Image: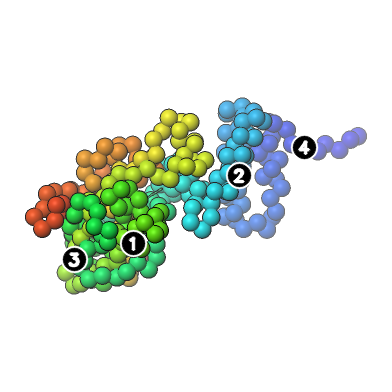
């Protein structure tokens, strides 16, 4: 009698692939890959994916990879516009209520920005509406955190980061790192950030257009707040009233991150926001 072999069929496609996994596969890798295969196959069956459509997808992914290099990361952009970056971040940073929430890092952070004393103006190109950013860094009990590093960056008045316009904007335009003293207070001057489109000249931009989606992000200031013994906060403050707050291309907006923007005296605007850090462990 012929031996019965469980060859690949449409009905048992998931089992056929996952049965190949080696017994010594690292447990977490085995769990992640088995689930990935299960959901990927379910997706193809759900939409009855055609070979032509899969060819288009392969071409899209190939172009996404080809567009990516040390400066441009089209795959992260894809993850961002699919809401996947925000989902993974949410799963990884479930914080107690009252703690400052995270949002996407984005592609424009540059390590080792200049360190400045509190109050310094980080706008080096002289463009835009002046704005004072201020507030405190505290723990969950309201105590000030001394020695917290506050790394900030934002676009210029025309909606571009310095790294998008080398030779046009001064290096380190609208970036800087500040360190809190014993009162936990921070303050720096810059410009009122403006809304801007994410880079839309690649496959991700084409996908957004095909889906009838705009590429815009509401105006925001990026903050990376770190202190020994506390969970690092990667976040932004958003400018209240911005027209794109409810349709951010990368789903980065959280109600708790919308900061006030009030008319100032020394500067055109004042934006106040307090950061609440969570202890590690
Ligand atoms: C940003 O805010 O800098 C950003 C975030 C995600 C994608 C593109 C830009
Ligand atoms: Fe940004």
Which type of secondary structure does the marked residue at label 3 adopt? loop
Name the residue: 26% across, 37% down: 243
Q: Nearer the viewer, mark 2 or mark 4?
A: 2
Residue in the picture at 8% in, 55% down: 265
**Contact flag, marks 2 and 4 (Cβ < 8 Å):** no
The answer to whether residue 195 is left or right of residue 24 is left
Which mark, residue 7? Answer: 4
Q: Disc 3 vs disc 1: which is toward the camera?
A: 1
Label 4 crowd (10 A; few <14 / some 14-19 / many >=20): few
- Residue at the location (36% across, 63% down)? 171
Q: Please name the residue that numbered disc 2 is placed on.
A: 62
How far is mark 1 from mark 2, CA to CA? 34 Å
Q: Which mark is residue 37?
A: none
Please say if the residues under marks 1 and 2 sit with CB atoms less than 8 Å apart. Answer: no
The residue at the point 48 percent across, 31 percent down is: 210
Question: Where is mark 1, residue-wise?
Answer: 170
Of pointers 2 and 4, the one earlier in the residue sequence:
4
Marks 2 and 3 in Cβ contact (< 8 Å): no
Q: Which mark is residue 119?
A: 3
N-terminal of the pair, mark 1 or mark 2, is 2
Q: Nearer the viewer, mark 3 or mark 4?
A: 3
């Amino acid at each position: 009698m012929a031996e019965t072999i469980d060859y690949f069929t449409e009905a048992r496609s998931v089992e056929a692939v996952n049965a190949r996994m080696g017994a010594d596969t690292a447990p977490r890798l085995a769990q992640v890959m088995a689930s990935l295969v299960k959901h990927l196959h379910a997706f193809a069956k759900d939409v009855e994916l055609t070979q032509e459509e899969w060819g288009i997808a392969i071409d899209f992914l190939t172009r996404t990879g080809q567009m990516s290099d040390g400066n441009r990361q089209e795959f992260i952009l894809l993850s961002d516009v699919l809401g996947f970056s925000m989902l993974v971040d949410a799963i990884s940073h479930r914080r107690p209520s009252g703690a400052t929430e995270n949002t996407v890092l984005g592609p424009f952070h540059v390590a080792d920005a200049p360190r400045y004393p509190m109050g310094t103006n980080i706008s080096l190109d002289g463009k835009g509406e002046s704005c004072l950013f201020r507030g405190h860094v505290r723990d969950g009990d309201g105590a000030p955190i001394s020695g917290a590093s506050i790394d900030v960056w934002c676009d210029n008045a025309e909606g571009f980061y310095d790294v998008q316009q080398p030779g046009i904007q001064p290096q380190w335009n609208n970036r800087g790192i500040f360190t809190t003293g014993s009162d936990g207070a921070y303050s720096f001057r810059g410009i009122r950030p403006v809304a801007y489109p994410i880079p839309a000249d690649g496959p991700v931009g084409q996908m957004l257009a095909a889906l009838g989606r705009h590429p815009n992000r509401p105006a925001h200031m990026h903050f990376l707040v770190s202190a020994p013994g506390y969970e690092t906060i990667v976040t932004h403050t958003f400018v209240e009233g911005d027209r794109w707050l409810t349709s951010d291309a990368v789903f980065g907006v959280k109600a708790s991150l919308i900061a006030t923007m009030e008319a100032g005296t020394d500067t055109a605007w004042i934006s106040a926001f307090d950061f609440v850090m969570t202890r590690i462990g």
